[in-house]
Amino acid sequence: MSTFVNVNRYFIRLAYKGTAYQGWQAQPHTTMTIQQQLNEKLSMLLREDVDCVGCGRTDTGVHARDYFAHFDAARPVSAGDADFVYHLNCVLPPDIAVKKIYSVPENAHARFDAELRTYEYHLLVGKDAFNAHQAWEIRNMPDLQAMNTAAGILQEYEDFAAFCKAGGNEKTTLCTIEQAYWMQHGPYAVFTISANRFLRNMVRAIVGTMMDIGRGKLQPDDMHRIIRSGNRSEAGASVPAHGLYLTEILYPEALKVNSDE
């Protein structure tokens, strides 16, 4: 006779510096992924097998200032349990920081319930010894005005196959971009882009294309031609991963996971 075990579902909110990790996704023959580190430490503290499901994949070297995952556990964890979060942070590596844990309905899903995702890409003119691997270091500031013109063109389209990594196995290349713009902060230039979903390698390919525009190799209007082509070879090269940050994930208000309450 089987025994029914009540399972509780939780969202976990965290941030991480991706420099030392081979991305979010668990992989054979290495423990150096964010997912594997979380699974291992949660399983140890909860004394049961835990398997986290992330809100999306981040590649090797990519950072996240705001990231969500969900997991199921038989042991109850009080929402906002500061002691549990403290102990979890104590056993996690210093470059992975848990912010909060939320109790959510059993059908809540960190990936499929996300309504909007925001990424930033950071450029740095020169070198900063205290922020190594935190931005792509370049020699000269590109033409941000031309790059912002190209960024505005992105919002006129929905099919971004031209910026999708080959072999990405995407079911659809359609995305709705809500905002895309560049801003300069001293020696830094930051690209912000928000969409309902992103294709694999999409942001890095977009930034690479914009860098060709900002350096005068292409004109802003070339963005129309590149997007309409649907061909990855028409777009620019992907920029280095270490300048990319996942900065915000928005969920339906009913889940109450974007509030600090």
Image: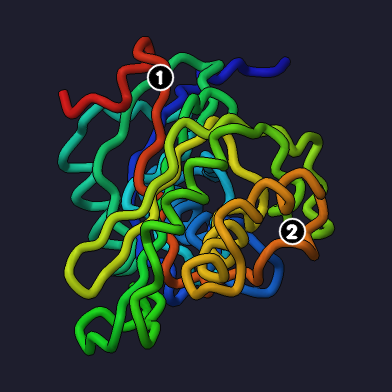
Q: State the SS at label 1.
A: strand
Foreground pick, 251 / 106: 251
Q: Nearer the viewer, residue 171 or 33?
A: 171
The Cα atoms of the two marked residues, 1 and 2, are separated by 34 Å
- Please determine whether, in this image, residue 62 is positioned above or below residue 260: below
Instruction: Report the residue at 67% width, 52% height from top.
Output: 200
Quarter of the image where the C terminus is located? top left
Q: Can I make out residue 104 in this image? A: yes
Quarter of the image where one finds residue 160: top right
Quarter of the image for residue 67 reads top left
Please give the label number shown on residue 104. Answer: 1
Residue 12 placement (x, y as % from top left): 37, 38
**Residue indicated by mark 2:** 165
- Mark 1 neighbour class, 10 Å CA radius: few under 14, some 14 to 19, many 20 or more: some
Relative placement, left or right, of 251 versus 261 is right
Residue 104 position in % (x across, y down): 40, 19
